[in-house]
Image: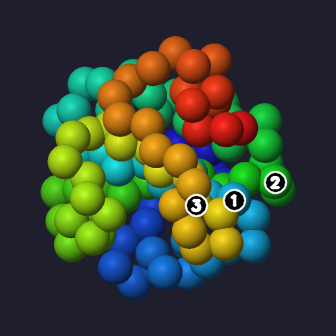
Amino acid sequence: MAEYVIAADQTNFSEVIQSETPVLVDFWASWCMPCRMVSPILDEIATERQGALTVAKVNVDENPAIASQYGVMSIPTIVRFQSGQEVSRVVGALPKAELTRKLGL
């Protein structure tokens, strides 16, 4: 995980999504193979957009209340927040080009 990718949990999640820069929140679990496929893509995006975008990872096994609050039913689910509001969502593992297009990046 890149150093500018944040592990989000109950203690810091509200601060993460209220960030002044857009935030991608990756809802994932360690046992999820598609989540493992998406993780390096999100690391690439975080590296390419460092300072303009934050990537946060929420482990759904450790933080089920956050996943429930945002209606995460399948993983991986990647949600883009801007000014604290959800603006786009992608469910499932997608290639980088399609992922960035669907998230509006």
The three-letter code of the residue at mark 2 reads: Ala
Side (left or right) of 91 relative to 90: left
Q: Is residue 54 above or below residue 12?
A: above
Q: Nearer the viewer, residue 5 or 73?
A: 73
Residue 53 place in picture, x, y as percent = 73, 53
Q: Nearer the viewer, residue 90 or 57?
A: 90
SS category of the residue bearing label 1: loop
Do we see residue 12 in this rendering?
A: yes
SS category of the residue bearing label 3: strand
**How far apart, in angstroms, are the residues tagged by discs 3 and 1?**
6 Å
In contact (CB < 8 Å): disc 3 and disc 1: yes
In contact (CB < 8 Å): disc 1 and disc 2: yes
**How far apart, in angstroms, are the residues tagged by discs 2 and 3?**
13 Å
**Rendering quarter of residue 71:** bottom left
The residue labelled by disc 2 is 52
Residue 14 place in picture, x, y as percent = 49, 81
Q: Is residue 97 above or below residue 61?
A: above
The three-letter code of the residue at mark 1 reads: Pro
The residue labelled by disc 3 is 81
